[in-house]
Image (cartoon, rainbow, N blue to C red):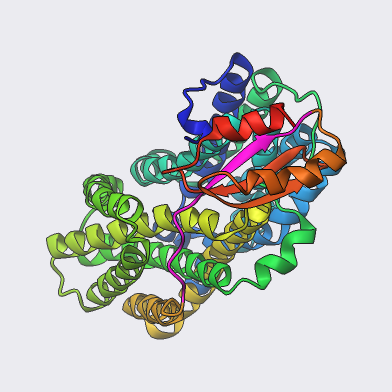
Amino acid sequence: MSGQEQGFDLNPTEKRAAAGLVAIFTFRMLGLFLILPVFALYAHHLTGSTPLMIGLAIGAFGLTQALLQIPVGTLSDRIGRKPVIITGLLLYALGSAVAALSTSIEGVIAGRLLQGSGAIAAPVMALAADLTREVVRTRVMAMIGVSIGIAFILSLILGPMLAAGIGVSGIFWISAGLALLGILLMVTLVPSPEHSRRHHDAAPAPEMMGRVFADGDLLRLDFGVFVLHMALTSVFLVAPLLLRDRFGLESVDHWQLYLPVMLLAMGLMVPFVILAEKRHLMKEMFVGGILVAGAALILMYLEAGNLWLFALVMIFFFAAFNLLEAIMPSWVSKVAAAEMRGTAMGMFATSQFAGAFAGGLIGGSVHQRFGLAAVFLFSAAMMALWALSSLGIRRPRHLSNFLLPLEGLGEMDMALLSQRLMTLPGVKAVQVIAEDGVAYMKVDNAVFDSEQATAIVAGN
């Protein structure tokens, strides 16, 4: 049985850490997502607005986020997690204020670039690792990850309503306020770790970058999440305009379409996620999700003016999107060696934000040069390219990551320990890293017994 299955509950410190970090991450991502469904509708009053510049404004945060994601995580190893996170939230609040006060599209772009420079994802994950035991760490990481999906769904509902009441500038002010609230939570709720160290399972490690780039399957997954978020950003450049101008749905009412679409898409997605994990059909669900998303984009391009048909197509697109969003991080975790998981996930997140930037830039350019519907066709073409690149991806082994703490053992003991751990049923790989005080293991939960591993450490 794995550490997660041993019945260990979060202790008071871990509960405070989880609650605070999940709230901070949710606030930040909500602030970023809130303008996604509305900015294209309200940007026309800004000086210098064109479809290209609007797309750049929507995606600009992804550029600085992608460039700074890993360096900021490394900086937090040196000067501490909390100072880096608080500075990132201040930069995010400053960027939000710049965007709120801007009367030109260039000013909003500058604000969005500043928002993205507050790249706190890696230090938040590292702080979560500092404040949690190995046996509950994966659970806390998953809670933080789920907050992204929650923030996205909330943004589709709240964005149109807020924009109708307070305008896009008001949304940016709310984003600034959420960032400042995050700082308050960081100071008052999130505990300070007794000591910080690099966690190879939770944060990027520069020395592992070469191994990530040498893994063809990881590169395919990175390209995949790049295309997926390029398509998502591109769709929201034009879908709100279609809903208002072609289907006659008032901007303030868009949430009435988005809410049932997302709820139905989530319900449609769940059985396929279960099939992927429980029946080991991850590759089939993965390729199927890409094909469904691509087909939905083609149907959006061909839509004939029927709102209900368009809504039905959106359900299938978001069902496929949510399926792929659920499958791919799990696949990265399965493919990456346990000791390079943090680096692999860091590169995956970097590719995701780069895709959001590319979707804004290229989608806006396509809209400006070839018209609104061409954006859907461009996104479908990228999906086709992704499908082709995925043909060679290997079916993942359904193994889990297990972290075995090794406090109190000397380096000689650690060097010999991996040989004994490899003899246990279900253990497929072991990497002992002395500086982490952890054995990173890949295990088959169907036969692995963590108590046997713990007994080996205790009796070593």
Q: As drawn, is 17 to the left or to the right of 29?
A: right
Residue 402 within the magenta-colored segment of the rendering? yes
- Name the residue located 34 percent from the left edge and 57 percent from the top edge: 280
Question: What residue occupies the far bottom of the structure in this picture?
Answer: 370
Question: Which picture quadrant has residue 125?
Answer: top right
Q: Name the spot of residue 203 as percent of width and height, x first.
A: 69, 47
Point out the stretch of residues depicted in magenta.
Answer: 393-407
Question: In percent of the image, x 24 and y 61: which residue is there?
Answer: 316
- Is residue 151 something one can see in this rendering? yes
Q: Is residue 250 magenta?
A: no
Q: Nearer the viewer, residue 148 or 88?
A: 148
Above or below 11: residue 20: below
Q: Is residue 198 left or right of residue 243?
A: right
Above-or-below relation of 61 to 54: above
- In terms of depth relative to the viewer, which is nearer, 103 or 292? 292
In the rendered view, would you say 101 is above or below 131? Answer: below
Most extreme residue toward the top, as rendered? 12
Q: Position of residue 73 (x, y in %)?
A: 74, 48
In the shown orientation, is residue 433 left or right of residue 325?
A: right
Residue 83 falls in which quadrant of the image?
top right
- Against 182, residue 70 (above or below) is below
Q: Quadrant of the C terminus?
A: top right
